[in-house]
Image: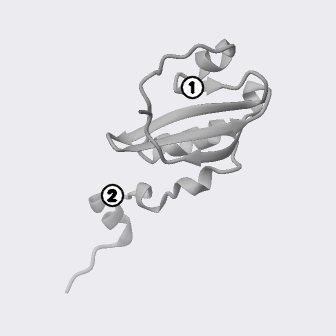
Amino acid sequence: MKTIPAFFAIILFGCNSQTSFDVSEIKGLPYEKAREKLLNAGWQLAPKPEYAGTRDDVIAKYPETMGCAVDRPFCRFAFIKSKNECLAVITVGEDINDFFVKSYLNECEQ
């Protein structure tokens, strides 16, 4: 029986890194890195929600912004994978370049 060298097996059958991704891996990461991991794992930016907030800089950089607290350094961002598979990512940090993922919720906006 002939065997296919590993190099050709990867080319023929592909490599699926999405199967090994666990959303819990984003906790504690800088938001920019967590966002990249989510997008690479097949998550999409949720359609831009209506937003009335004071952080126009955040909205301009991250269209998935759901909102930012006025009195605390927290923001919330929305991702979607399917109609019933949604993710809200909560960050902490004052400066837009220093947001870190504090937590996440598997929920869809009503």
Q: Would you name the residue on which mark 2 appears?
A: 14
98 left or right of 34? right
Distance from the alpha carbon under mark 2 to that under mark 1: 34 Å
> Upstream in the sequence, badge 2 or badge 1?
2
Q: Residues within 10 Å of mark 2 (few under 14, many from 20)?
A: few
Indicate the quadrant where residue 68 lies: top right
The amino acid beneath tag 1 is Thr
96 left or right of 104? right
Q: Residues within 10 Å of mark 1 (few under 14, many from 20)?
A: many
- Residue 95 on image: x %, y %: 79, 26
32 left or right of 37? right
- Residue 33 on image: x %, y %: 63, 41
Residue mark closest to the camera, 2 vs 1: 1
- Residue 105 on image: x %, y %: 54, 46
Q: Closer to the camera, 104 or 6? A: 104
SS state under label 1: strand
